Image: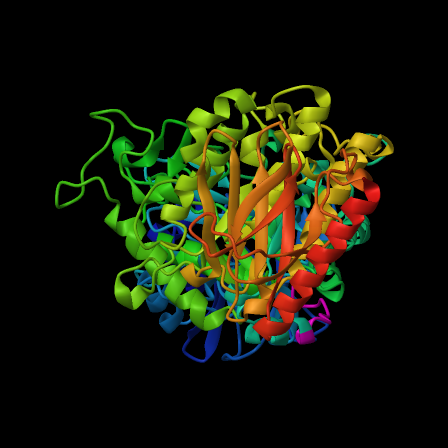
């Protein structure tokens, strides 16, 4: 080595590079002006020799081996700026030429870093992670990761033979963010971050902000350019933005993509294969939305996606990110909304994931009493850390912004809100006031919902919150958490608890049927018959029903009737609308062959017609969250297991009268009070012959009599079928005189018919 070059070298710093312990490699590597010349240094431990080609020069400049570890240097007799490539001859005799990564300026600005460190970079995914781009005419990929406590971070992959010495990243200010632009790395490249911790341990981590991942059991990240997909759903998004879903029908079909339908070899269908078939079924049934159990990348199939590793990566089980975008776009073309399950409550301990990310407890608290989730064996996010909050908030927005999701359903919110969730005494730490509320999680949820409302263009946020935490859907400025909807777990548990009983014993559980109306308007509710109710030995909805086989099916049809006429938006898990006997198993398809059997087809027909009725009758959805939309007629007939209620709008002629008999005894001349004098026509009966029932129907229109019943001035007498729901449209008498005349005429006609019959 020439003496001049030798004297320019910082040998102490070079040692840090060669031992891969440097977090500011650009201080040495790459080009640095020295007077009128430029010193170029490169660390290429796999090279036999290295030369520099400046611009398009045909005569490269040989670099001198400054250190036997593979550290090279040379002086170029010109000042910056200029571009150059490195020509590397490897030990195997091959030669490669590439642009030096260390000659490029950084991409992330100090403003980006400050926003991120303060937890308010809502598009952090645009700067962190792996992004295909072009800098100074050179194509490559920019990598960035947050690892503030790492000694050194490198990008490793097939492009550098997984050698962490090759592409050591530059740490930016005090932000904890490392970045590096690597020329030549293209879409589809496989990579990880090699992290050298302060105690010298080497960790290999998938990219927390990565847009793609390998198919399990492989677990590296994959460079994915998600900017090129051409969307065709702007009309759908614009319509969604203007829609007030509170006053619209929302019927959600919950789906696990991996088991809705399997391929011929019992494998997975791709996003593109499943979309047309799923959309066809959803449209046939009339559902307004589908809800996908988590499609974010996860290592274990049996977790169903609820133990996420890649919060920005659609799972590769079903295809590429572009395939997933196509799936979403196709659903919107069929006017089907898509809600995505999302899990900000906890994450798995897999070594390649977020746990102990940079050699410290970065995403989780170092105090195991705050980080351990004993029920699920997972780790709880540290919501007190701004960068962790940023990670989660940006993730929720990402799925709406980049994949046009129509809603985010937030899983396990209760476990976020309570510090003692699933824990025994001594296993948790109280908050600063001595309480069990997780104040940091509360602030995260409020922050997320506030930002979401401003940026999501009409997409909604739904909480799966299983406790009585107040004002989950309350307004933020009134002390609420700001969610759009909450799953009504209380209604579901009470109702299914009631339905499991034989009708003989239901009498003593009648309160479980009626009690949820006490709090029905405390939140904006979705009524869920979800996957959680048909796994882990609980059986399917059909198997929960008591009685003979016929009675089981009748009970299930009545239960669906209660679901679709009760206040609240609706959610039904796949397979339940065909009356599966077996509980859900992610290793098999929905048992579609059951539709060949009459009993199951009748259940399916009932569901289809109930969804259609729900969507066509404003009384069933317009005042879902307003107490004026519901009124009890009879909620005291425990001995008969009958409930009678009204669903209403501001217009009297849109009123519906609902009668449900949860007893297996028919009532032939059952008297019920009605809201006003008028006509009452049965428009749905789950006991109809076309649904496999006894056809115990009210085939004629009933005109009310001025006879008191149920505290009402007017009443009708109807047939009440066993284990069934009957729904009547209500037409007020107007003018009263004419209705009375018609009622008298009807009475005379009926009297004459009786006399002739005699």
**Viewer-proximal residue among 462 and 529:** 529
User: Could you tell whether 289 is left or right of 359 in the image?
Assistant: right
Q: In the rendered image, is residue 742 in sight?
A: yes
Predominant SS along the magenta part: loop
Kindly give the residue lying farthest to the left in the view shown. Answer: 433
Task: Check the picture and name the quadrant holding the C terminus.
Answer: top right
Q: Position of residue 78 (x, y in %)?
A: 53, 79
User: Could you tell whether 413 is left or right of 532 in the image?
Assistant: left
Q: In the rendered image, is residue 163 in sight?
A: no
Q: Is residue 222 magenta?
A: yes
Q: Position of residue 245 (x, y in %)?
A: 54, 65
Residue sitting at 18 percent across and 43 percent down?
Answer: 431
Residue range in magenta is 221-235
Q: Is residue 160 magenta?
A: no
Residue sitting at 68 percent across and 66 percent down?
Answer: 742
Q: Is 350 rendered above or below residue 617? A: above
**Viewer-proximal residue among 160 and 501:** 501
Q: How many numbered discs?
A: 0
User: Could you tell whether 358 is left or right of 46 in the image?
Assistant: left
Q: Position of residue 548 (x, y in %)?
A: 69, 19
Residue sitting at 31 percent across and 59 percent down?
Answer: 480
């Amino acid at each position: 080595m020439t003496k001049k070059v030798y004297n320019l070298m910082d040998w102490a710093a070079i040692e840090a590079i060669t031992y891969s312990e440097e977090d500011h490699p650009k201080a040495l590597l790459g080009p640095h002006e020295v007077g009128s010349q430029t010193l170029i240094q490169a660390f290429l431990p796999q090279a036999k020799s290295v030369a520099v080609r400046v611009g398009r020069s045909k005569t490269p400049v040989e670099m001198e081996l400054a250190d036997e570890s593979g550290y090279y240097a040379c002086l170029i007799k010109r000042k910056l700026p200029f571009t150059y490539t490195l020509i590397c001859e490897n030990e195997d005799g091959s030669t490669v030429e590439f642009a030096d990564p260390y000659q490029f300026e950084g991409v992330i600005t100090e403003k980006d870093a400050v926003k991120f460190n303060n937890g308010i970079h809502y598009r952090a995914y645009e700067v962190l992670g792996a992004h295909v781009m072009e800098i100074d005419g050179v194509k490559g990929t920019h990598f960035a990761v947050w690892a503030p406590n790492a000694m050194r971070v490198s990008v490793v992959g097939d492009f550098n033979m997984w050698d962490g010495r090759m592409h050591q990243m530059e740490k930016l200010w005090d932000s904890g963010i490392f970045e590096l632009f690597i020329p030549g790395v293209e879409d589809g490249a496989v990579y990880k971050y090699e992290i050298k911790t302060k105690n010298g341990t080497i960790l290999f981590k998938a990219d927390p902000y990565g847009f793609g991942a390998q198919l399990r059991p492989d677990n590296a990240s994959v460079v994915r350019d998600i900017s090129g997909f051409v969307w065709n759903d702007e009309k759908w998004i614009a319509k969604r933005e203007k829609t007030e879903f509170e006053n619209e029908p929302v019927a959600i079909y919950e789906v696990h993509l991996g088991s809705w339908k399997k391929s011929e070899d019992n494998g997975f269908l791709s996003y593109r294969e499943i979309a047309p078939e799923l959309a066809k079924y959803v449209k046939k049934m009339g559902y307004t939305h589908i809800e996908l159990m988590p499609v974010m990348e996860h290592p274990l199939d049996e977790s169903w996606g609820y133990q996420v590793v890649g919060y920005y990566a659609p799972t590769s089980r079903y295809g590429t990110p572009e395939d997933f975008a196509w799936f979403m776009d196709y659903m919107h073309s069929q006017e089907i909304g898509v809600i995505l399950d999302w899990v900000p409550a906890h994450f798995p301990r897999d070594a390649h994931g977020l746990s102990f990310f940079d050699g410290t407890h970065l995403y989780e608290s170092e105090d195991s009493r705050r980080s351990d989730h004993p029920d699920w064996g997972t780790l709880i996010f540290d919501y007190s850390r701004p960068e962790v909050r940023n990670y989660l908030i940006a993730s929720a927005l990402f799925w709406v912004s980049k994949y046009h999701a129509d809603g985010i359903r937030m899983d396990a919110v209760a476990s976020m809100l309570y510090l003692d969730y699933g824990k025994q005494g001594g296993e948790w730490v109280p908050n600063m006031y001595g309480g069990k509320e997780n104040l940091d999680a509360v602030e995260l949820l409020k922050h997320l919902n506030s930002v979401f409302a401003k940026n999501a263009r009409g997409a909604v946020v739904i909480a799966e919150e299983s406790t009585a935490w107040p004002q989950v859907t309350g307004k933020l400025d009134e002390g609420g958490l700001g969610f759009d909807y909450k799953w009504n777990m209380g209604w579901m548990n009470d109702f299914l608890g009631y339905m499991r009983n034989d009708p003989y014993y239901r009498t003593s559980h009648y309160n479980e049927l009626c009690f949820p109306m006490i709090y029905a308007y405390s939140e904006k509710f979705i009524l869920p018959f979800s996957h959680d109710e048909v796994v882990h030995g609980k059986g399917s909805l059909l198997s929960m029903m008591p009685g003979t086989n016929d009675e089981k099916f009748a009970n299930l049809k009545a239960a669906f009737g209660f679901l679709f006429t009760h206040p609240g938006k609706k959610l039904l898990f796949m397979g339940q609308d065909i009356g599966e006997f077996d509980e859900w198993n992610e290793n098999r398809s929905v048992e579609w062959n059951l539709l060949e059997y009459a009993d199951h087809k009748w259940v399916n027909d009932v569901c289809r017609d109930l969804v259609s009725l729900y969507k066509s009758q404003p009384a069933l959805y317009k005042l879902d969250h307003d107490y004026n939309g519901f009124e009890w007629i009879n909620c005291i007939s425990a001995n008969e297991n009958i409930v009678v209620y009204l669903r209403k709008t501001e217009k009297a002629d849109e009123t519906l009268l609902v009668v449900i008999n949860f007893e297996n005894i028919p009532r032939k001349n059952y008297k019920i009070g009605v809201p006003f004098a008028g006509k009452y026509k049965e428009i749905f009966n789950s006991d109809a012959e076309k649904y496999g029932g006894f056809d115990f129907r009210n085939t004629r229109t009933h005109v009310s009599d001025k006879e008191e019943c149920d505290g009402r001035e007017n009443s009708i007498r109807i047939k009440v079928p066993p284990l069934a729901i009957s729904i009547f449209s209500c037409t007020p008498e107007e003018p009263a005189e004419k209705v009375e005349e018609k009622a008298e005429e009807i009475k005379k006609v009926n009297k004459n018919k009786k006399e002739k019959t005699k």
